[in-house]
Amino acid sequence: MSDRLFGTTGVRKVYGEEISLDMALELGKALGTYLKKGNVLLARDARTTGAMVADAFSAGLLSTGINVHRAGVIPTPTLAFLTRHLRMDTGVMITASHNPPEYTGIKFWKSDSMGYTQDMETELEEIYQSHDFNSVGWDDLGEETSLDSPEWIHIQEIVKRTNVDAIRQRDFRVVVDPGNGAACVFTPYLMREIGCRVTSINGQLDGHFPGRESEPDEDTLGDLIKMVKSSGADLGIAHDGDADRVVFVTEQGDVIRGDRTIALLAREFLQRKKGGVVVTTVDSSKVLDETVKASGGQTIRTPVGDIQVAVKMKEKDALLGGEACGVFIHPDFHLAPEPFLTSCRILEMMASRGKAFGELISEIPVYPLKKTKLKCPDAKKRVVMGRLAETLPDEMDDVTDVLTVDGLGISLRDGWVLVRPSGTEPVIRITCEAQSEERAQSILEDAKEVVQKAIDEVRE
Ligand code: MG
């Protein structure tokens, strides 16, 4: 068991092995000690462990004198949005996002709807490890209240920002696949509110995730693809367990990668605003940079993670941000992932252009992407990456830029390669992209050889 509680963002661990109820209780006390006073909004996803972990966490907070407002099972973006909207001091989501059902986790949101930064998490972890918690007497304890239907506040705010008349006129048919996760209580109702005909699959909340694996991608969305095609639907919408991600399926049944969808939205927003900044992570397709540039905008890359994207967006006053895995951030609304407004924006575009989603997205080219991973013990990763920073750019042809914001990213005249040590497995991942299958494969082979050589040469 690792001593460190926090990972890349928040806490995410296997219940019963790596995280216990006692730990949740103490982390609640640590947060209360960190905040000193005020109000915390607390919600959870549909995992079997959720209610119990939330109860323990709440007890910890109450014992330090913090008031706890319980929001039940809602999507992570709803929790983040409501934290700002209801002027809470912090929002806490009991969720393990898209991880398998045995995981539980705890994620923290600031009063401005942005996730806790790593510095804030480090401070929280220090308090947790010190066991030096505030403790108040029986007459100063925090109070616990429950919010009634909190998701409706979020739905109303999205509807206000959406051209409902345009969508309603088209009488769109959508199929929603929440994957038995937190969006079961959200997306089908939102779609109905904006005038779509809605069918759901995997639409009952169930922490065992019986319908499919929680991460929405081509491998897990077979049922949604079939349903969209057989019902003649206009759009398929899929989410992960805590619904901070959304992946779209065309009327033809094609699953579209998030970076192409960001490119489609960016083009629309940039044309309207006459330029601006779009923020994405190092693993997005070059097609995004090209689309943004052609629309008069600029792309900025950050390390992987929605909070990294949000921090950069705030700094650069960006128009739009997101990640290829299905994260979209709309800063004119709030600074957390917003899959629901994104779905509305796609339907608006289909309505205003009079085109199917498949037709619209076909205007954004697909560049082949290749991935592999090589075994590398954790202890060697840092030295291997240091060596690769020197050797890999020399070994590749036509290098135009070297990015070191997260792992090692090398831009080539006709593609790119990204080498990153995994944060959770003893492997180094290689991803590359080019405009043809053959070229992508040859970049991958070249990079693989150099990375393997570095792993072999470094001693543990
Ligand atoms: Mg998630």
Image (cartoon, rainbow, N blue to C red):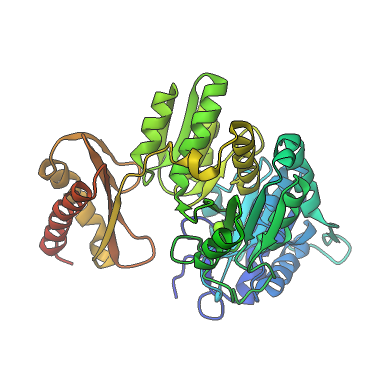
Residue 300 seen anywhere in this rendered image of the structure? yes
Residue 352 shown left or right of residue 222 in the figure: right
Q: Residue furthest bottom?
A: 16
Q: Residue at x 49, y 30 (%)?
A: 267
| Above or below, comparing residue 318 to residue 18 in the picture | above
Q: Quadrant of the C terminus?
A: bottom left
Q: Quadrant of residue 422?
A: bottom left
Q: Quadrant of residue 214?
A: bottom right
Q: Residue at x 59, y 54 (%)?
A: 237
Return the x and y of residue 68 as percentages of the image width and height: 79, 58
Towards the viewer: 241 or 211: 211
Towards the viewer: 444 or 454: 444
Return the x and y of residue 39 as percentages of the image width and height: 77, 51
Residue 384 shown left or right of residue 339 in the figure: left
Q: Quadrant of the N terminus?
A: bottom left
Return the x and y of residue 34 as percentages of the image width and height: 65, 53
Q: Residue at x 21, y 34 (%)?
A: 413
Residue 167 shown left or right of residue 419 in the figure: right
Towards the viewer: 416 or 56: 416
